[in-house]
Image (cartoon, helix red, strand yellow):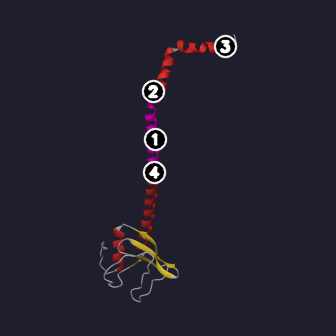
Amino acid sequence: MDFKEYQSQNKPNWIKRNPVPSAAIALMTLAAAVNFPTIAQNMEATGRVREKAMENSELNQQLQATSLFVEQQAEIAEKRYSGGCVLVVASDDPSKFTSLTEGQPVLDAVRGVPLPAGTVVCDAFGNTSRIVPVDGNPVAGEFAFTGNKQVVEDAIAASNADAEINQPNIE
């Protein structure tokens, strides 16, 4: 008798000789077949959780980058205030502060002409800007903001400005 004949004769005997492992294998196969939909749902849920975790990680990284940017901008703005930026007031009522607007010229109150490029300007609300040339016209650009009210108040006091602060209206 050769090996192939021996093997073919002994195959059915393995199950008979090993009833417990055979039953365990059969039960596991049956359980896997019965639970396949649940297993698939669990795998799908795990995939969704992993995807949501990646989204949250990306959002967290974005928030950290934004926070760092805000900190850097505040540092720039505070240096501008302490360095003596030109406080802007309303052209139609110099007794009132106004806010800066990006891309708009800032006018010399006496002569009514735009301030030259390179001038650092600020407002009473924490916004600072450097006048930059855009299409040959000097306008407010390179904005930086600080929420440090003390720095702003110190700059206002140092400027001897008599203007009053009016909060912007929202309609």
Tell me how far mark 1 sits from mark 2, CA to CA. Answer: 19 Å
Q: On the rendered image, what quadrant is the C terminus found in?
A: bottom left
| Foreground: disc 4 or disc 3 | 3
Mark 2: secondary structure? helix
Q: On the rendered image, what quadrant is the N terminus found in?
A: top right
Sequence-first tag of 1 and 4: 1
Q: Which residue is mark 1?
A: 44
Three-letter residue code for mark 4:
Glu
Q: Which residue is mark 2?
A: 31
- In the image, which residues are magenta? 32-54
Q: Work out whether residue 9 or residue 150 is closer to the camera in this orientation and state it.
A: 9
Q: Which residue is mark 4?
A: 55
Q: Residue at x 45, y 64 (%)?
A: 72
Q: Is residue 149 magenta?
A: no
Residue with the most extreme top position: 1
Sequence-first tag of 1 and 3: 3
Three-letter residue code for mark 1:
Glu
Tell me how far mark 1 sits from mark 4, CA to CA. Answer: 17 Å
Sequence-first tag of 4 and 3: 3
Q: Which residue is mark 3?
A: 5
Residue 81, horizontal then vertical, whole percent = 40, 73
Mark 3: secondary structure? helix
| Foreground: disc 1 or disc 3 | 3
Q: Residue at x 36, y 79 (%)?
A: 159
Q: Quadrant of residue 167?
A: bottom left
Q: Residue at x 43, y 34 (%)?
A: 38
